[in-house]
C-alpha cells in the first residue's frame, strides 16, 4: 500500500484509509477488531474515527483492536462542537475541545492523537479560540496534527491565514464528501484546500454504496443498506445517476476493474488527495477497498472517463 503525506505538514498516510464509523453501530468489538486487523495486514495505516461514532464505542473498539500495533497506525479522530442547547460564552469551545481530547485519548488507549479534526466549525465562537486551543494541544504532545471537516472554502482560507499570521499549528487536512456522484466540492472547496497546502481526505467515496455495484435501477434496495434506511442517501438513486453508473461500470469493466475500484482510484488520482476514507463491515470489504489502491489511472484513462449528464 502506497503512502502520501497529509498536506505539507502532516504525517504519511496510506492512500486508502479505513473509516471506523461502523464500529459500535453496525459492528461489535470482535467484528471491529477483525476489520482493523485485516486493514493492517493489507498495509492500511490510516484509521479515521470520531467521538460521535457509536457514542464513543468506535474509538474504544479501534484502540483495543490496534493494541500492540498502535505505532503502525495513524489515528485520526474528531471532536464534537458544543452541544446545540449550550449558549456560547468565552472559553466554552476551549473547554469542549480540551475535554473531548482527554476523553478520546482515554477511549483510544493512547498517549497521542495523530490527526485531530474539528468535526464541525463553531458558528458563534471566534476562530482564535479553536486555533489557540488546538495549538495548546499540539504543544503538549497530545495531538500531533490538526485538521478540519465540514467546512466551506472561506473557512479553510480563514484557518490557513490565521495559522500563518499567528504562527500556530496549521490545519493539515480537510475531510470532505467527494465521489464520482457528488462533485460540488470541486468548485470552491478543493481549490481552497490546495491553495492552503492541506491534504484532501474524501469520505463516502462509494456514494454510500451507489458506486459499489450492488444497486441496480428498478430493483429494491438491499435490506439494511444505506439507501434503504436513509432518505438522504436514497436521494442519489435517480434515473440520471443510474444511467451514469452504467457508463462507469462499462468503463471499469473494459479495463479489467470493478466500479468500486474505479470510484476509489479516481479520487486517488485527483490533485491534493492524500487518502481516501472507505468504511467496511467485513475483512472482505477491506480487501476490496485496498485492491483499488493498485489501480493508478493514467492521463488517458482520466480523459476517457464518462462524464455525468449536465444539469
Image (tube, grey):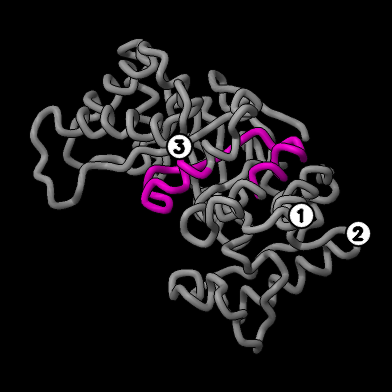
The answer to whether one can see residue 196 in this image is no
Residue situated in front as seen by the camera: 162 or 287: 287
Instruction: State the residue at coordinates (67%, 57%).
Output: 282
Q: In the image, what residue occupies the spot 33% across and 23% down?
A: 134
Residue 77 — which label?
Answer: 3
Residue 145: image location, x then y, percent: 46, 22
Residue occupying image coordinates x 62% and y 79%: 222
Mark toward the start of the polypeptide (3 vs 1): 3
Q: From the image, tell me which residue sits under label 1.
A: 288
Task: Choose between 140 and 268: the one closer to the eye.
Answer: 140
Give the mark nearest the N terminus, 1 or 2.
2
Report, in whole angstroms, how far the alpha carbon at label 1 lies from the one at label 2.
14 Å
Q: Residues within 10 Å of mark 3 (few under 14, many from 20)?
A: many
Residue 145 visible, this angle: yes
Provide residue 49's location: percent of width, then percent of height: 49, 43
Q: Does the magenta stretch include residue 242?
A: no
Query: What SS does tag 2 mark?
Result: loop
Quarter of the image for the C terminus: give it. Answer: bottom right
> Callout 2: 10 Å neighbours few (<14), some, many (20+)?
few
The residues colored magenta run 35-61
Quadrant of the image occupied by residue 241: bottom right
Secondary element under disc 1, as helix, strand or loop, is helix
Label 2–label 3 contact, CB within 8 A: no
Mark drawn on residue 257: none
- Pick the residue in front: 60 or 243: 60
Residue 52 x/y as whole percent = 37, 48
Mark 3 residue element = strand
Which residue position holds label 2?
A: 256
Quadrant hosting residue 272 = top right
Amino acid at each position: 500500500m502506497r503512502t502520501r503525506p497529509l498536506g505539507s505538514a502532516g504525517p504519511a498516510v496510506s492512500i486508502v484509509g479505513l473509516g471506523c464509523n461502523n464500529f459500535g453501530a453496525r459492528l461489535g468489538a470482535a467484528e471491529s477488531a477483525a476489520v482493523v486487523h485485516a486493514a493492517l495486514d493489507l498495509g492500511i495505516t490510516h484509521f479515521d474515527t470520531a467521538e460521535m461514532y457509536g457514542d464513543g464505542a468506535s474509538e474504544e473498539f479501534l484502540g483495543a483492536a490496534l493494541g500492540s500495533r498502535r505505532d503502525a497506525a495513524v489515528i485520526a479522530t474528531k471532536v464534537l462542537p458544543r452541544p446545540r442547547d449550550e449558549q456560547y460564552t468565552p472559553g466554552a469551545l476551549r473547554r469542549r475541545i480540551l475535554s473531548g481530547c482527554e476523553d478520546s485519548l482515554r477511549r483510544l488507549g493512547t498517549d497521542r492523537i495523530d490527526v485531530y479534526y474539528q468535526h464541525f466549525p463553531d458558528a458563534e465562537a471566534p476562530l482564535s479560540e479553536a486555533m489557540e486551543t488546538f495549538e495548546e494541544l499540539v504543544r503538549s504532545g497530545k495531538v500531533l496534527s490538526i485538521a478540519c471537516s465540514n467546512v466551506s472554502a472561506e473557512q479553510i482560507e480563514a484557518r490557513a491565514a490565521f495559522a500563518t499570521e499567528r504562527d500556530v499549528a496549521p490545519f493539515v487536512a480537510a475531510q470532505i464528501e467527494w465521489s464520482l456522484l457528488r462533485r460540488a466540492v470541486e468548485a470552491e472547496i478543493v481549490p481552497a484546500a490546495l491553495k492552503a497546502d492541506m491534504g484532501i481526505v474524501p469520505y463516502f467515496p462509494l456514494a454510500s454504496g451507489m458506486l459499489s455495484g450492488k444497486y441496480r435501477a428498478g430493483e429494491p434496495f438491499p435490506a439494511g443498506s444505506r439507501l434503504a434506511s436513509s432518505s438522504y442517501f436514497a436521494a442519489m438513486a435517480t434515473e440520471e445517476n443510474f444511467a451514469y453508473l452504467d457508463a462507469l461500470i462499462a468503463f471499469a469493466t473494459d479495463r479489467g476493474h470493478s466500479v468500486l475500484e474505479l470510484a476509489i482510484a479516481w479520487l486517488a488520482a485527483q490533485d491534493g488527495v492524500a487518502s481516501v476514507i472507505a468504511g467496511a463491515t467485513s475483512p472482505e470489504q477491506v480487501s476490496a477497498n485496498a485492491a483499488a489502491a493498485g489501480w493508478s489511472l493514467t492521463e488517458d484513462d482520466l480523459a476517457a472517463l464518462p462524464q455525468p449528464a449536465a444539469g
